[in-house]
Amino acid sequence: MGRLKLQTGINSIEEEEPEECDAACPNRTTLSCMINSEIGAVLAVMRRNVRWGSRYMSGDDHLEHSLIQSFKALRRQIFSWNHHQWQAINPTLYLQPFLDVIRSDETSAAITGVSLSSVYKILTLDVIDHNTVNVEEAIHLVVDAVTSCRFEVTDTTSEEVVLIKILQVLLACMKSKASVMLSNQHVCTIVNTCFRIVHQAGNKGESLQQISRYTMHELVRCIFSHLQDVDNTDHALVNGNSNLKQEV
């Protein structure tokens, strides 16, 4: 499940209202505004954190942490893309900053939790499907980042919230239109990670226990829903990697 680094003095999970889109937002696409809102949500929680809040006080972009810089760079880019052809835009461009936060062991549970929520919202918009450019790499990056999630644990409640959000994102990966691009290895990684959380949940709160069991049931259902495609394996091997249809 990745390393959970214990450290005190970190704020508990709390979210600020995200920054509003700029004045030009009504003329932009809904997806651009949504991503901009998620960027604002993550940066807002960073500002309220003891460690990260000071990164904003210098007023010098060059002194800001790379995680903050990547979000600001993304915010400058999203409204310049050709929004009529989102499938032609590499999903890693707008997912990577959130995934970097999820992987980082410098971030608190609050920051990690908001980033996981942002990735979940993007996946559930169904913008990313099997026709999206570089979709295989993108969906694999999401699974790799979430299953190796790192964050500072200060209390049981904040830990459970992050674990619940990890379950939500992994299930969203399996339910997304891009799930057919998942390799056997990544499907197994998703199932193993969720199963470990189910096992850990036995000593935690009732909410985590119920959600983890529900997630496992849904994962099994999703995998078996591909049984109808088991004989259609003409495109199952691409550069030596097998996809979800072979897994079942």
Image (spheres, helix red, strand yellow):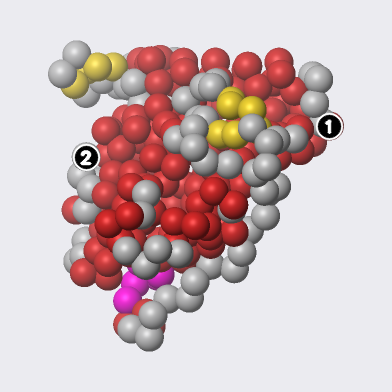
Residue 172: image location, x then y, percent: 51, 39
Residue 192: image location, x then y, percent: 54, 15
Measured in 3D between alpha carbons, the distance from the residue under mark 1 to the one under mark 2, in whole angstroms, is 39 Å
Q: Horizontal placement of 223 versus 68: left or right?
A: right
Q: What residue is at 48 percent from the left and 76 percent from the top? A: 20
Q: What residue is at 59 percent from the left and 52 percent from the top? A: 50
Q: What residue is at 52 percent from the left and 57 percent from the top? A: 53
Query: In the displayed image of the protein, which residue is found farthest to the bottom?
Result: 23
Question: Which numbered tag is attached to residue 134?
Answer: 2
Q: Nearer the viewer, mark 1 or mark 2?
A: 1
Indicate the secondary structure of the residue bearing disc 1: helix
Is 46 one of the magenta-colored residues?
A: no
Q: Which residue is mark 1?
A: 206
Q: Amino acid at mark 2?
A: Asn
In the depicted view, which residue is nearer to us: 230 or 121? 121
Question: Which numbered tag is attached to residue 70?
Answer: none
| Residue 211 location, quadrant | top right
Camera sees residue 31: no
Residue 219: image location, x then y, percent: 57, 26
Q: Which residues are magenta?
A: 28-34
Q: Horizontal placement of 239 versus 46: left or right?
A: left
In the depicted view, which residue is nearer to us: 81 or 85? 81
Work out whether mark 1 precedes mark 2 in sequence or the reverse, and give the earlier one: 2
